[in-house]
Amino acid sequence: MADQRKIKYTTVSIPISLYERIRKLIEGTGFTSVSQFVVYVLREVISEMEEEKIRSDSISEEEKKAIIERLKRLGYI
């Protein structure tokens, strides 16, 4: 039998003018409601922000090499 877990929801308020703009924007698209579109957009934005945070939290190989070179020049390595 398939997993029957229920997804819990909350309410988020947005200005009516924004709601109406979104409603018009999604007409004729695959989105069946403003809520569905907003969830999609928020997931995309959050995903991008999480990826950016991961990139900013780690340093590149080039940055590592520059740090090592600087430490060598300063006599620490």
Image: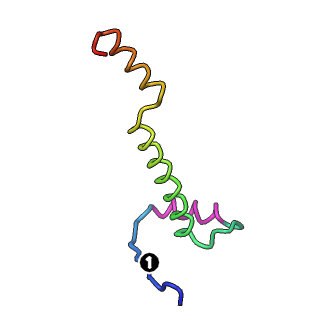
What span is in magenta? 15-26
When asked about the image quadrant of residue 54, the answer is: top left
Where is mark 1, residue-wise? 7
Residue 20 vs 3, above or below: the answer is above
> Quick one: quadrant of the C terminus?
top left
Residue 30 vs 57, above or below: the answer is below
Of 60 and 34, the residue lying toward us: 60
Residue found farthest to the left: 76
> Residue drawn at (45%, 39%), measured in percent from left and top?
55
Residue 74, horizontal then vertical, whole percent: 30, 10
Verify whether residue 22 appears in magenta. Answer: yes
Residue 32, horizontal then vertical, whole percent: 62, 73
Residue 76, horizontal then vertical, whole percent: 27, 15
Kind of residue at disc 1: Ile
> Residue drawn at (48%, 24%), measured in percent from left and top?
62
Q: Dot 1, crowdedness within 10 Å: few (<14), some or many (≥20)?
A: few
Verify whether residue 37 appears in magenta. Answer: no
32 lies left or right of 52: right
Residue 40, horizontal then vertical, whole percent: 55, 62
When asked about the image quadrant of residue 27, the answer is: bottom right
Q: Main secondary structure of the magenta part?
A: helix
Instruction: Provide the secondary structure element on which disc 1 rests.
Output: loop
> Residue drawn at (58%, 61%), measured in percent from left and top?
22
Residue 34 vs 58, above or below: the answer is below
What kind of colouring is applied to the model shown? rainbow
Of 69 and 20, the residue lying toward us: 69
> Residue drawn at (38%, 19%), measured in percent from left and top?
68
Residue found farthest to the front: 77
Of 65 and 17, the residue lying toward us: 65
Number of marks: 1
Of 19 and 62, the residue lying toward us: 62
Residue found farthest to the right: 28
